Image (cartoon, rainbow, N blue to C red):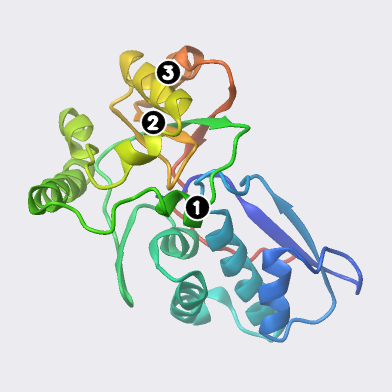
Amino acid sequence: MAIDRYMEVSFAEEGVGSEDHLAMRVFRQYGGRGGLKITSTIPPARGMGFSGAARVIGLAAAAVQQGQTLDECRRWLFLESTELEGHPDNVAASVFGGVTVAVGERVVRVPLGIQAQVVLWVPDSRSGTKESRRKLPTAVPMEDAVFNLGRVSLLIAALANGDVELLQEATQDRLHQNARLEQQPATANAMQAAVDAGAWCSWLSGSGPTAAALCEPAQAEAVAAALPEGGEVSISHIDMRGAVCERS
């Protein structure tokens, strides 16, 4: 799911922008010249897709500098950033916007039958994806795999059909969320507070520690107000555009 948290770059003279920034490293890797002014409202190591967005924007900047348009190279942008990221989940949303399902080289936009806002609770603590994965089992029971497959199917149907009553059940998980939340009890509290305040559903964003909740726009302020201290609270929209290039 793409939301209106953005990483933006603009071309600048040599020396502008940190060479250590992931977006800059990808820009250089693909032949980018000069500097990049980089701004971001996506915090790193919070489960919000920072690394995927950085790789997409670095690639996009290099492609645009070399004369391509994003519409011409959007599929290449997806495939190349997937290769760099190691999986398509976050980069698909960054490239195409909306709610996406990605399997290998195939990506599909899920049609949305709802009007919704996303309420985020972002704590100061960090959680690296690799570190978080070490807490997960290397094998899972068959019944848990079947449980999750059913919920994924239900989630897609609920979003497409606008059946919000199904969303809480559809976002249940047995493969990763509980294990990660054992180390992040404040996030679990935020997720429950969001549902208690009227959100349709809540979930651990990526590997955490961010909590996300989906609700009708009229309920967003109440959900945000109910979230506990210890995290930055914001209300976001689902972004349907994906990667864009704006020329001055």
Q: Nearer the viewer, mark 1 or mark 2?
A: 1
Name the foreground residue: 171 vs 175. Answer: 175
Disc marking residue 241: none
Q: Residues within 10 Å of mark 2 (few under 14, many from 20)?
A: many
Name the foreground residue: 229 vs 222. Answer: 229
Residue 17 location, x and y as percent? 83, 63
Q: Residue at x 67, y 65 (%)?
A: 22
Work out whether mark 1 precedes mark 3 in sequence or the reverse, and give the earlier one. Answer: 1
Q: What type is the residue that disc 2 sits on?
A: Ala
Work out whether mark 3 precedes mark 2 in sequence or the reverse, and give the earlier one. Answer: 2
- Circle 3 sits on which residue? 223
Work out whether mark 1 precedes mark 2 in sequence or the reverse, and give the earlier one. Answer: 1
Q: Residue at x 31, y 36 (%)?
A: 178
Residue 225 location, x and y as percent? 50, 13
Residue 92 location, x and y as percent? 42, 64
- Circle 2 sits on which residue? 213
Judged from the image, the secondary structure of the residue bearing numbered disc 3 is helix
Q: Residues within 10 Å of mark 1 (few under 14, many from 20)?
A: few
Q: What type is the residue that disc 3 sits on?
A: Val
Q: CA distance from mark 1 to mark 2?
A: 24 Å
Q: What type is the residue that disc 1 sits on?
A: Glu
CB within 8 Å, label 3 to label 2: yes
